[in-house]
Image (cartoon, grey):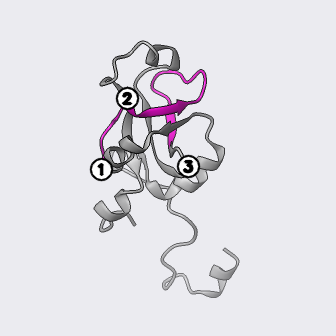
Amino acid sequence: MRRAISVGRDQLMSVGVCFGKFTKSGKFKLHITALDYLAQYAKFKLWIKPNGEMQFLYGNHIAKAHVGRISEDVPEHQGIVIFSMADVPLGFGVTARSTVDIRKLQPTDIVVFHQADVGEYLREQDTLF
């Protein structure tokens, strides 16, 4: 921001990282550009198996069959960061069930609802910034 002082206000477009945007209804929609910061400080994490990575990156929800590991004591409807098995952050979502309930589910049941993934850089590059 100190360097931005030397640029005139009418020529400066933005400073820093875009974490998201406010919708017309006043809600904040988190963008994938915040993933690097969320991944560092995330309390709840899920590691996805290699056979489920591409499905998640195409915008699909995560089924129980694709879960490699998950943090302990994750509550239902909680934000969660998705990692590959190699600890590469892939995106984030919202849990459909708690960790206790996930153990009882069928392999085809949804565990995490998709919110954003790194594939959005390609799919929505016109509206991302």
Q: How many angstroms separate mark 1 from mark 2 (CA)?
A: 17 Å
Residue highlighted by disc 1: 58
**Classed neighbour count for the residue bearing mark 1: other residues with Cα under 10 Å, few (<14), some (14–19), many (≥20):** some
First in sequence: mark 2 vs mark 3:
2
User: What are the residue bounds of the magenta stretch?
Assistant: 59-82
Q: Is residue 117 above or below residue 42?
A: below
Name the residue at the front extreme: 51
Residue highlighted by disc 3: 86
Q: Is residue 74 magenta?
A: yes
Residue 23: horizontal and vertical position, in percent? Answer: 36, 50
Residue 38 falls left or right of residue 104: right
**Classed neighbour count for the residue bearing mark 2: other residues with Cα under 10 Å, few (<14), some (14–19), many (≥20):** some
Mark 3 against mark 1, which lies toward the viewer?
3
Q: Name the mark on residue 65.
A: 2
| Residue appearing at x 59%, y 48% in the figure | 39
Amino acid residing under circle 3: Ala
Image quadrant in which the N terminus is located: bottom right
Q: Secondary structure at mark 2?
A: helix
Amino acid residing under circle 2: Ala
Q: Secondary structure at mark 1?
A: loop
Amino acid residing under circle 1: Tyr
**Classed neighbour count for the residue bearing mark 3: other residues with Cα under 10 Å, few (<14), some (14–19), many (≥20):** few
Q: Secondary structure at mark 3?
A: loop
